[in-house]
Amino acid sequence: MTQRAWLKRLRPVLSTLLSAAIVGAIFFYFLPKFTDMSSVWTAIRDLTPVEIAVLALAAIWNLCTYWLVMVATMPGLTYPQAAVVTESTTAVSNTVPGGGAIGIGMSYAMYSSWGFSRSRASVSLLVSGLWNNFAKLAMPVLALAIVALQGGATGGRLLAGLLGIAGLAAAVAVLALMLRSEEGARRFGLRAGRVASAIRRVFRKPPVQGWELATTKFRSRTILLLRARWKWITFVTLVSQFSLYLLLLLTLRLVGVSEAEAGWAQILVIFSFARLVTAIPFSPGGVGIVELALITGLAAAGGARADVAAAVLVFRVLTYVLPIPLGVLTYIFWRRNRSWRRPPNSAPRTALVPEAV
């Protein structure tokens, strides 16, 4: 076996070991030194059955919100189908190193089995991903603006806000350049194809082909979708993002972190920047990293260490752990359910889906 083949096999093993090391260091070294774990478990056990039920309902609603995004960006997709594809891919992303890429491949497989073309699936995945990233970049800016209005802005926070604005502007500019003209989209595809081909040559793989055709098709379909639904896509994306924040806020309040200890605007700032951390895939689903960012940030804001740690752990159980068994069940359902299966490219068409595939 060649050295390159060994490296290819070794890469996922090293990625898994790195993720395990990060998680172990945070949960078994950092947390016990940061606070008294017996106090953390006491704060969790003090939650009443009614409070647990309220948190469970809020967590279920949070899971449902992303189904709205998928249906909005995929004409013809039903809510049950959106639930299956969303929960199945989330379970993979939360458990496997590099699970995001595997989840995208799983999404294509599910959409194809239901008769959706790769083109329609690509538009949905790209638009939902772009709007999700736009929201992630915009939320810290909004949060910092609120804190500034409350008189809590600092030089560091203002700099972070300016960087967030710059990142959001750059992301919007790239999308605008792709959508401005067909020729611009074609050139973008050609340049991106050249870069991808150059990278593939390093690994002695053939160059990519047809990227300019893909980008022009993406442009036409994206324009058609956004002209009709950009307001609704933006609204449901914001609902999804803020539902996650409100679940964190609710968890903190029920565990015992008061407004006087950590204000809702401060929590929004910390939550927003913790969400940005997940853009770097140190571990599946950001496990360990997100907990570290939230706990240290909320404690620095004034929350009691044990209560903050308890609330964050409950929050992550509801948002990181809960989707895993649900995703396993939805994946099994997809594999066994044949009533939704359709021949390729035979999914129901709407006014937003051109005849040409």
Image (cartoon, helix red, strand yellow):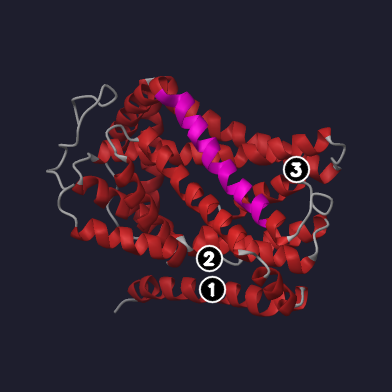
Contact between labelled residues 1 and 2, with CB atoms less than 8 Å apart: yes
Residue 22 percent across, percent down from the top left: 60, 72
Q: Which mark is residue 265?
A: 3
The 10 Å Cα crowd at callout 2, few under 14, some 14 to 19, many 20 or more, is many
Find the magenta span and give its range. 229-251
Secondary structure of the residue carrying tag 3 is helix
Mark number displayed over residue 92:
none
Q: How far apart are marks 3 and 1 (CA)?
A: 34 Å
The residue wearing badge 2 is 283
The amino acid type of the residue labelled 3 equals Ala
Q: Residue 179 or 5: which is nearer the viewer? A: 179
Which label is found at residue 18? 1
Tell me where residue 120 sits by quadrant.
top left
Q: Disc 2 and disc 3: Cα gap in Å?
A: 28 Å
Q: Do the residues labelled 2 and 3 touch (CB within 8 Å)?
A: no
Query: Which residue occupies the foreground of this view, 340 or 206?
Result: 340
The quarter of the picture where the C terminus appears is top left
Closest to the observer: 262 or 192? 262
Where is residue 74, by image quadrant?
A: top left
Query: Disc 3 vs disc 1: Cβ atoms closer than 8 Å?
Result: no
Single out the mark in the foreground, 2 or 1: 2
Q: Is residue 177 visible?
A: no
Residue in the picture at 14% in, 44% down: 342
Q: Is mark 2 on a helix, strand or loop?
A: loop
Q: How crowded is mark 1: few (under 14 residues within 10 Å), some or many (20 or more)?
A: some
Q: Which amino acid does label 1 sit on?
A: Leu
- Residue at 77 percent across and 74 percent down: it is 35
Residue 143 pos. (x, y %): 72, 39
